Amino acid sequence: MAVYSASSRHAILVAIALMALPVSGQTRLATLSGFVSSRADGERLPYATVALAEHGLATQSNSEGYYAITGIPSGLQEVTGFYVGHSVYRDTVTFEPGRDVRLDLDLERQTTRMNEVLVEADAAADELRQLTSVVAIPMQSVKRMPAMGEPDLLRSLQLLPGVQTASDLSSGLYVRGGGPDQTAIFLDQVRLYNPSHAFGFFSTFNPDAIKDVTFYKGAYPARYGGSLGAVLDVQNRDGNRRDFSTSGGVSMISSRLMTEGPLGDGSWMIAGRRTYIDPVLNLIRGSSDEFDGLGYHFFDLNGKVNTQLTPNDNLMISAYGGDDNLNVALSEGTDSLSFNMIWGNRALTGRWTHVFSPELFGRLIAVYSKYQSDISVNIFGAPRAIRNRVREITLKGDADYFTSSDHTIRSGVDLTFFRFDYGVRFDQYRDNLSTDPFLLSAFVQDEWQVSALTETRLGIRTNYYEEGKRFVINPRFSLSHLLQDGLRAKLGGGSYQQFLQLVSQEGFSGGDVWVPLDKTVEPGRSWQIVSGIEWEPSGVYRLSAEAYMTDLANLVVLDEEAEENTQRGNSEDVFKTGGDGYATGLELFAEKRGGKLTGWLGYTLGWTRRTFAEVDEGRSFPPKYDRRHDVSMTGIYRFKPVCDTCGRWSFNFNFVYGTGQAFTPAAARYTLRDPATDEPIDRLLGARRNTGRLLPYHRLDVGLRRTLKLFGEGVDAEVYLQFFNFYNRRNEWFVEYDPEDSSKKPKVAHMLPVLPTFGFDFRF
């Protein structure tokens, strides 16, 4: 059995399309449809290719693995199925006029060895690369990257060109000059508002439970909405339909476990993770008389059940829950301090899919989501509290209509009911925002194979937001043209709208506050245009370049100068509004996917600016995360095994370099007289906003892994040792000035030092 590389499959598709010309006049009456699955575990395979080469007909499966080919001439024909990393499926089918044929394809997973080194390919990534600014990362690659404690999806994405982080303590995604709120993150159709643990050390995604990751850095299609910049769409595993299996891992910080198995004709999956930092904190508390209380923990729990009601009906229920809980209490004499922070997400999804006809595939989805954040501080008897709640109830209906081998129409309607609560209390100061608007959205998109070499996706999304009765139309487009075998040019863009605003600390992720924009403030708007070129000379090497330009309007920023003795009840009282901005840049990317050494090298040259009439006298300024140069490199070197049963060693590394973050330096000091005591009071006069720069950021992470077979051949295991910030670079975090003592030099806070960790992963 043969295994096809990405470039060879593209050549096959071009040949199939060209062969279609002589038969265009034939009568086509039959339809072929079905699901494409992996024979090993029954997981449905998205974006697989199914073709009838004799008559030049081909299509790709949708996100649920369903495909349909219409207009098939009668006669005996060979059906082939392609999915990178799997053997080619071949079968012969007799088609008759007016007869619809159902054929479910089970593809055998295969591996290819290049120079005696295992190469794993990802079909979804290969198909999605035909689009603009799309990345699909195989979870096996994420698991092999050195990280802080354990593999992490968001920190792996931060190694891509165009993606940055604010600090070592933040897992937020700053994509192409946008803040973390400008990237919408979904898990099984549910939006997660703060997908982080331990103030950004980890994300909420359990690496064992993830099935598919699609990351749109820009120019995302019409079926998504709600963000000005980017979209991260994560799908958890459906569960093993064939056998019972278990996987997990133990690290220095947490343990995780995932188990799955068949359920009738369907499947189930459950996964959990919890930290065990608690015992360490208990030791600290017991060794100090000043600690009255010190505790922290986080947990994640994922679950999914799939039921195959009929050959045409599937019911899926997915659930997620995760919390962080931090408590600190200090006392010294009569003085005391307490700090409590709780944040977390709850999500529940129900999805029914139905094959209405061979050409029409539909979904009905119901979603419940809740995000909560509670922060309370009591310093020497002065309490302060911040409370935030975001609740969503969403109903969705969408369909894929395979009209012909050249056109696939996708359309849908979303209705979301929100409930927002945001409150701040400090002495006489009050912020209270509470509203429950709804958002009605609809989209339609045509995926059109214009010719053998050109594909376009034209879409439009409409939004009606109840607050302010705002109706907006957002057009989207994407164009891909194959210049020659392995060389592709791409263009994409569109209009985007955002109705929510994040209030958070840029230095770390935790306790984020989300508030709606009500009728007093216009929602954020962006226009994006992205162009690029990609060259894949073989199935091993890939080079790409993309240039992007984003124009931003109706931006808001928290009003830190508002009077603290007033009560504020709407958005215009909380934010400075009417901001404009732009982000532009160039991304270069080189990837090697085969051989002993695999990995990628990325470089970004970028500019980001913001302008507010009420900020810095209306002058343009760079946000903190503006970064002129950004370099990232990651690699995995697999050593040749000494024998077939000895296991394999691999060496992993990440290196990042970036221009220092922007900050506002002190321009001068001046002295005032206290009117009550006539004592001098030193004050700082700030320079123009964010005109200073910290030192450049750079860091090297390294790791060593070894695969093992335990209990005979029953358990696949892997042990690892890794070092975060291997050469202990003291990267600068922020600069702090003492406004009351002009003789003191500014203090520079630094990020994390070298952190060694080790752990153990297993699967059986």
Image (spheres, rainbow, N blue to C red):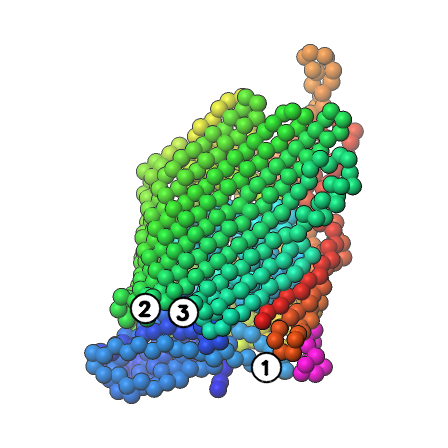
* Image x and y of residue 674, in percent: 69, 15
- Kindly identify which numbered label has been placed on residue 113: 1
Query: Going by the image, does 436 lie left or right of 153?
Result: left
Query: Going by the image, does 404 lie left or right of 704?
Result: left
Q: Which is nearer the eye, 32 or 176?
A: 32
- Kindly identify which numbered label has been placed on residue 264: 3
The amino acid type, in three-letter code, at marker 3 is Gly
Q: Secondary structure at mark 3?
A: loop
Tell me: residue 80, above or below residue 147: below
Question: Dot 1: few (<14), some (14–19), or many (≥20) neighbours within 10 Å?
Answer: few
The amino acid type, in three-letter code, at marker 1 is Arg
Residue under the point 30% across and 67% down: 355
Q: Secondary structure at mark 1?
A: strand
Query: Going by the image, does 202 lie left or right of 452?
Result: right
Residue 634 appears in the picture as rendered: no
Residue under the point 68% across and 26% down: 380
Quickly name the residue at label 2. 310
Q: Earlier in the sequence, mark 1 or mark 3?
A: 1
The amino acid type, in three-letter code, at marker 2 is Thr
Q: Earlier in the sequence, mark 2 or mark 1?
A: 1
Magenta-highlighted stretch: main secondary structure?
loop
